[in-house]
Amino acid sequence: MARQKGIKPVASNRRARHDYFVEETYECGLALHGTEVKSIRQGRVNLKESFARIKDGEAFVESMHISPYEQGNVFNVDPLRPKKLLLHKAEIRKLLQQVQRKGYTLIPLQLYLKDGRVKLELGVCMGKHLHDKRDAAAEREMERTAQRAVRTQSTD
């Protein structure tokens, strides 16, 4: 069977862009077991409440829930186990420097299949305060009203 070409989104962390300012994004692979990959292909993954951590020169994603594969047996693993992120050493060092700055954290933004391989979009994020969220909501509302006005004017 030929490997699929292109990008197929599996799961996204929509809450991340609401709660954080995304400064930079990285694409990285994941070290997974076979039954985890099969479960991801079925879309049985949850990125809510997940985060990434750098420990001993290696990057791990924590609290990413991959449901056990239904047809699996003894090969199923713990759904919440830390998964190793596949990044170059220089990228890990750069991420570590960015995270050590005050208020920055690593948040998984999206999980997708790229040419048949599981990839994770990792964001270097800074937390938003309540007033920042209000400003973003007001900005979206102004954009919507402007779009509505343009649409009604073009139909007249």
Image: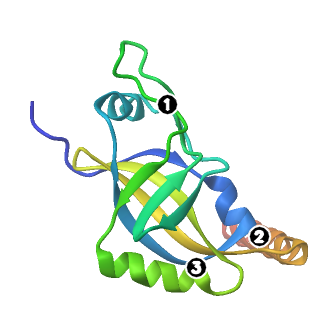
Secondary structure at numbered mark 3: helix
Type of the residue with mark 1: Asp
User: Depth check: 60 or 40 in front?
Assistant: 60
* Image quarter (top left, top right, bottom left or bottom right) of the C terminus: bottom right
- Residue 20 horizontal/vertical position (percent): 70, 70
| In this rendering, the label closer to the viewer, 2 or 3 | 3
Secondary structure at numbered mark 2: helix
Q: Is residue 130 above or below residue 68?
A: below
Residue tagged by mark 2? 140
- Residue 110 horizontal/vertical position (percent): 49, 55
Q: CA distance from mark 2 to mark 3?
A: 29 Å
Q: Are marks 2 and 3 in contact (CB under 8 Å)?
A: no
Q: Earlier in the sequence, mark 1 or mark 2?
A: 1
Q: Residue at x 41, y 21 (%)?
A: 69
Q: Is residue 155 above or below residue 67?
A: below
Residue tagged by mark 3? 99
Secondary structure at numbered mark 1: loop
Q: Earlier in the sequence, mark 3 or mark 1?
A: 1
**Residue extending furthest front?**
56
Residue tagged by mark 1? 78
Q: Earlier in the sequence, mark 2 or mark 3?
A: 3
| In this rendering, the label closer to the viewer, 1 or 2 | 1
Type of the residue with mark 2: Arg
User: Depth check: 120 or 72 in front?
Assistant: 72
